């Protein structure tokens, strides 16, 4: 119903204005809601959620980039959306978040964000998941896990073309290696495996 959509859009704008003007915002209760709905594949819902990600990131005192382990994989999954406008919106949001991390590399949560990036990068090299499964017992015993459950475990939210998801994840991993140095050493095996699989890919964009 168009009337309902119009009302929802008006309410959305009003709430964003209130949050933006508030001296403080309780982000912790909001994050589980945001994370849960990032699983949705509805294009309108994704547009709505990315608008909130952008709004919250623009509010300096909220420091959304410090809470990325909870929502990053959901944002990456939107890069596989069938609508180009939504893909570009997600790509822009991720670029802004990465820029914030680059401005303060010493505060980045490498231990919990890097596994998310590895899972997303594996979407560009389909054989990676099979290769990694054979070593899952070793990986699980040595690598930290991200908060809550993973987005990329067969759920509908990770359907679609993984090419853009993987390419952007590879770019993030490259930046993490540059920024984090020794802090990404625990993930050397996963990262090197991605390099091997990417180097042997038939796709030129993967090899690069």
Image: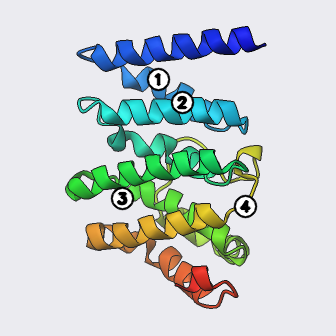
Q: Residues within 10 Å of mark 1 (few under 14, many from 20)?
A: few
Image disc number at residue 63: none
Work out whether mark 1 precedes mark 4 in sequence or the reverse, and give the earlier one: 1
Q: Disc 3, disc 4: CB below 8 Å?
A: no
Residue at left offset 45%, top offset 11%: 14
**Residue 78 visible:** no
Q: Looking at the image, what colour scheme do you see?
A: rainbow
For the residues marked 2 and 3, what is the alpha-carbon distance in whole angstroms? 22 Å
Work out whether mark 3 precedes mark 4 in sequence or the reverse, and give the earlier one: 3
Foreground mark, 1 or 3, reads 1
- Residue pointed to by mark 2: 34
Q: Residue 61, located in which quarter of the rendered image?
A: top left
Q: Disc 1, disc 2: CB below 8 Å?
A: yes
Looking at the picture, tell me which residue is in the foreground, 159 or 81. 81
- Residue pointed to by mark 4: 161
13 over 47 or under it: above or below: above
For the residues marked 1 and 2, what is the alpha-carbon distance in whole angstroms? 6 Å
- Residue pointed to by mark 3: 110
Image disc number at residue 30: 1
Q: Residue 138, located in which quarter of the rendered image?
A: bottom right
């Amino acid at each position: 119903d168009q009337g309902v959509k119009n009302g929802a859009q008006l309410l959305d704008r009003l709430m964003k204005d209130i949050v933006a003007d508030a001296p403080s915002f309780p982000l912790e209760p909001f994050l589980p809601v945001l994370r849960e709905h990032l699983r949705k594949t509805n294009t309108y819902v994704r547009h709505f959620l990315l608008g909130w990600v952008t709004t919250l990131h623009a509010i300096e005192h909220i420091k959304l980039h410090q809470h990325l382990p909870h929502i990053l994989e959901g944002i990456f999954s939107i890069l596989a959306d069938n609508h180009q406008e939504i893909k570009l919106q997600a790509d822009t949001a991720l670029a802004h978040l990465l820029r914030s991390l680059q401005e303060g590399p010493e505060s980045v949560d490498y231990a919990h964000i890097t596994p998310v990036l590895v899972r997303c990068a594996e979407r560009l090299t389909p054989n990676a998941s099979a290769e990694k499964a054979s070593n899952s017992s070793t990986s699980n015993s040595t690598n930290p896990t991200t908060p809550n459950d993973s987005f990329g475990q067969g759920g509908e939210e990770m359907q679609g073309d993984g090419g853009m998801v993987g390419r952007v994840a590879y770019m993030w991993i490259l930046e993490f290696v540059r920024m984090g140095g020794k802090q990404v050493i625990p993930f050397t095996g996963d990262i090197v495996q991605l390099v091997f699989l990417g180097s042997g890919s038939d796709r030129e964009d993967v090899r690069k």
